[in-house]
Amino acid sequence: MPPVDAKHEAKRRVLKEVFGFDAFRPGQEGAVDALLDGKSVLTVMPTGSGKSLCFQVPSLVMGGLTVVVSPLVALMHDQVAALRLAGVAADTINSSKDRAENVAAWRRAQAGETRLLYMAPERLMTERMLAALGRLDVRLIAVDEAHCISQWGPSFRPEYETLARLGDFFPGVPVAALTATADEVTRKDIVAQLFKGRAETFVLGFDRPNIRLSVEVKRDSSRQLLSFIAGHAGESGIVYCLSRKKTEKTADLLVDNGVRALPYHAGMDKAERDANQNQFMTEPGTVMVATIAFGMGIDKADLRFIFHADLPGSVEAYYQELGRGGRDGQPAVAHMLYGLDDIRMRRVFIEQEDAGDERKRREHKRLDALVAYCESPACRRRALLDYFGERIDACGNCDVCLDPVDVADGTAEGNQILETVQRTGQRFGAAHIIDVLRGTLTEKAANFGHDRLLTFGVGADSKKQEWHSLIRQMVAAGFLNIDIQGYGGLGITEKGGALMRGEETFQYRKDALRRVTSGGRKSKGRAPAPDLSDGESVLLGRLKELRLSLARERGVPAYIIFSDRSLVDMARRNPRTVDEFAEVNGVGETKLREFAEPFLDAIGGSRSRSMRNGS
């Protein structure tokens, strides 16, 4: 490793010559410096803010071998492919490769040819692998998706727990832990487990002010989705669905309605997934309908919307997924649909986890926080950032700020609901409770004698939607719970009992049925790339076509060749020479040698066409 006074120069040189960047992004340099000083770090940065460079730059400055722990095989492959295209000797040993390939990768690491070696935690933390790595020149360890190590994290993975022993096997080797989604409790747990309390923590602000946040109650989800998409015609975005089946059904719905949409989920053939991903990255106005299997490592800067067709699993998951929109800094929308059935299904998933009671309790609390966010009568961004410990004033760029909701006292209505739930035995779901309240004589009401209850028909003047809203908000506020182990029956909580005794009040937000379902103003055709002229936008399209062709030749996703940011910069700069091409954002020395000629040819050809057309 270079001496202290040379570190600054070395990191800048690596940043420019290898990765093609003139300066670090906010939050990166502090983590890089700490690692170069031999300190361990926890880095919490939003999705798309460049976490990987925080350990990749120190790795190349330090020399020796860096071991990178990653939870997903697909993510490992993409990151290794991206590093190799940048001229970095990177490798991965994982279960998707045959034994001969893994042996060859290990021999390259043994010979000192590899700078970064990616592995899953279960492969790394075997006695045999640890002993073998102990004989190599390991200078740095990086743990990606570090929230997986915490029992309190949003996606705890038991195999990550074993990483707590890394310090015993590699004393004095700095460890970089990286995540985009960790609240204060999770951050403290990561530092305690992985670093025994000794690490520097870097938390970059969570706010993405260019993304408009909006939430809508499910009524007719297909109609709501089509209405939203109509307001974003010609724009690229992601529609997240809870299941594989719904993903394919939703993609078909969009295609049938004239939208260029593609499905993506883990059950699809890999070749089909890769083809859909490349098309999404390359063709303007493409909508990807996906499960959470899609998104990690994707660097498409011009996503104008993220639409959640179902309730995510936690605030952290929601934040990570919405953060894939608007990475170019231009306006984007994150719109979510949710309903009582979503809450019930999420509760079921938690109970079905192979986890202890304390872990499940924590996950229910996480879900409570997300439901409370959905039902918030005040600024959504403030509620979201407050969860991560960041305080802001009202944002002016969410549905609540732009169209404030009316808050009313619902204590009387709340008591009618609670009394009906109690008199029916705390075993029926919302639909039946509403039938009783509205005095609807169903077969079920007649069979159980519920048509003779004192509360039968007391709410006949209110619509079903209004009672649904009240019950949903009472669940969110903790007056009612849903029996997730049974059939979704409503039960009265301790807080609900206090309301019945007159010790609590219930304030609710009136559902604004008039709310715009498009999640924003209607687009007039496809939005152009930011600040590009018509000619530059045409050139950008040609550059994306070339990028896809080169990606197919190499068998890698298109974004690994160049990110959208690099192509936009290329179109804007319109370089004529290799030296000018070298100044493009994201063009390091290896990519300069590999790609200058074909991209300059494409740019020159486009310039000639423009001249012939007199533009």
Image (spheres, rainbow, N blue to C red):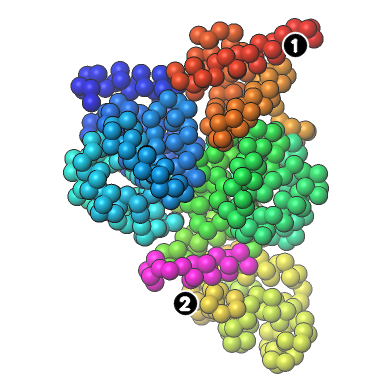
Q: Position of residue 198 (x, y in %)?
A: 22, 45
Looking at the image, can residue 84 be seen?
yes
**Residue 119 sits inside the magenta stretch:** no
**Residue 357 sits inside the magenta stretch:** yes
Disc 2 target residue: 494
Q: Nearer the viewer, residue 355 or 385?
A: 355
Helix, strand or loop at mark 2: helix
The quadrant in which the N terminus is found is: top left
Q: Identify residue type, mark 1.
A: Arg
Which residue: 51% across, 20% down?
594
Which residue: 44% across, 36% down?
80
Nearer the viewer's eye, disc 1 or disc 2?
Answer: 1
111 horizontally vs 338: left or right: left
Q: Which mark is residue 609?
A: 1
Which residue: 55% across, 60% down?
371
Quadrant position of residue 223: bottom right
Q: Position of residue 169 (x, y in %)?
A: 20, 48
The magenta span reads 341-359
Quadrant position of residue 547: top right
Q: How packed is label 1: few (under 14 Cα within 10 Å), some, or many (20 or more)?
A: few
Residue lying at the far front in this picture: please name it. Answer: 100
Looking at the image, can residue 335 be seen?
no
Q: Nearer the viewer, residue 610 or 367?
A: 610
Q: How packed is label 2: few (under 14 Cα within 10 Å), some, or many (20 or more)?
A: few
Q: Identify residue type, mark 2.
A: Glu
Q: Position of residue 113 (x, y in %)?
A: 32, 30
Helix, strand or loop at mark 1: helix
Label whose residue precedes the other's in the sequence (1 or 2): 2
